[in-house]
Image (cartoon, helix red, strand yellow):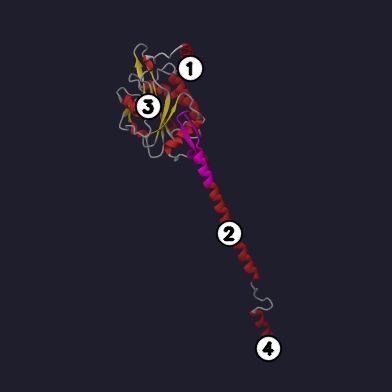
């Protein structure tokens, strides 16, 4: 099944109404217990923990693939747990992800890998292929073979997706009454070795947030400029806001290093310039061959007189 805008837009309206109703109830009295569908649903931090790379999935071509095949020594991986028949959250999440990747200077398949993994064991490779075609079709960077291979949609008829989600702290729940899943919305950014590096939660995936999460996960290895190194060194993730902010102390450290480097460079340059000027003065002060008073000119005079 392909996500459709009308479906999730209607869902968003319903969700907004539900939030408004909840706020109204809360204002009138004590907060009601969390609905059953939302219990044990959310993100549990697994930062620094290794994901099991020996898991196998089915890709959009219907082939069995090892999770380890998407990891190498350089590229970080953006993991997106979702399910393709989701009526609301997942299509919005993937559309926002697509927008974020379109605004990113890094190229999928070249600088990082993106894996959308369905945690619904009933979903098929055909559903994965349909959604892959939809979102790759809206990717504005050149669709090179590397880009196509670098953004994959995976399904798993067994427990592989559940195991992977548990490893990264992504908690979801099946709701029998609706036949849908209750789940959080988040990107999980993994290191090239498969360790959890950062969560980008919610539905606001700005190019800046994705860029900094990828830089952090790669330890700066995919940096394309001095600006990227500056961002990697001076920005830190703030878990209270879910955003990257300037790290004042690191910024001052970098400023001090740059200032000290500039002063040393200036001193070395001035000393080199002074040595060069002194050398030129010494050369200019030396008697030139043939000039009056030099040994060679006196010898020439004596020879001339003898003749």
Q: Earlier in the sequence, mark 3 or mark 4?
A: 3
**In this rendering, the label closer to the viewer, 4 or 2:** 2
**In this rendering, the label closer to the viewer, 2 or 1:** 2
Q: Is residue 111 left or right of residue 265?
A: left
Residue 154, quarter of picture: top left
Can see residue 142? no
Query: Residue 232 or 2: which is nearer the viewer?
Result: 232
Report, in whole angstroms, how far the alpha carbon at label 1 lies from the one at label 3.
30 Å
Q: Is residue 212 left or right of residue 64?
A: right
Q: Earlier in the sequence, mark 1 or mark 3?
A: 1
Report, in whole angstroms, how far the alpha carbon at label 4 lies from the one at label 2.
52 Å
Find residue 5 and name its label: 1
Residue 182, quarter of picture: top left
Q: Earlier in the sequence, mark 3 or mark 2?
A: 3
**In this rendering, the label closer to the viewer, 1 or 3:** 3
Find residue 306 and name its label: 4
Q: Earlier in the sequence, mark 4 or mark 2?
A: 2
Residue 209 image offset from top left, x and y in percent: 48, 31
Q: Which residue is mark 3?
A: 44
Can see residue 86? yes
Q: Which residue is mark 2?
A: 271
| Kind of element beneath mark 1 | helix
């Amino acid at each position: 099944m392909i996500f459709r805008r009308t479906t999730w837009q209607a869902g968003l309206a319903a969700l907004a109404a539900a939030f408004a109703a909840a706020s109204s109830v809360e204002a009138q009295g004590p907060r009601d217990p969390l609905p059953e569908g939302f219990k044990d649903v959310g993100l549990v931090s697994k930062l620094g923990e290794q994901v099991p790379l020996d898991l196998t999935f089915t890709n959009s071509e219907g082939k069995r693939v090892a999770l380890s095949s998407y990891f190498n020594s350089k590229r970080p991986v953006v993991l997106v747990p979702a399910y393709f028949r989701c009526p609301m959250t997942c299509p919005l999440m993937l559309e926002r992800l697509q927008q974020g990747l379109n605004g990113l200077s890094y190229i999928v398949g070249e600088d990082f890998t993106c894996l959308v993994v369905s945690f619904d064991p009933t979903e098929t490779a055909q559903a994965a292929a349909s959604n892959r075609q939809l979102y790759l079709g809206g990717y504005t960077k050149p669709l090179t073979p590397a880009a196509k291979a670098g953004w994959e949609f995976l399904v798993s008829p067994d427990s592989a997706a559940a195991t992977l989600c548990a490893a990264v702290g992504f908690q979801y729940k099946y709701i029998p009454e609706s036949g849908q899943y209750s789940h959080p919305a988040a990107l999980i950014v993994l290191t090239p070795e498969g360790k959890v590096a950062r969560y980008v939660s919610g539905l606001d995936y700005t190019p800046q947030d994705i860029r900094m999460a990828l830089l952090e996960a790669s330890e700066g290895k995919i940096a394309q400029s001095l600006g990227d190194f500056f961002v990697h060194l001076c920005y830190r993730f703030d878990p209270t806001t879910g955003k990257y902010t300037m790290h004042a102390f690191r910024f001052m450290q970098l400023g001090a290093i740059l200032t000290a480097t500039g002063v040393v460079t200036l001193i070395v340059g001035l000393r080199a310039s002074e040595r060069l000027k002194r050398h030129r003065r010494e050369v200019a002060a030396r008697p030139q061959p043939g000039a009056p008073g030099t040994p060679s000119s006196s010898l020439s005079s004596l020879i001339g007189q003898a003749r």
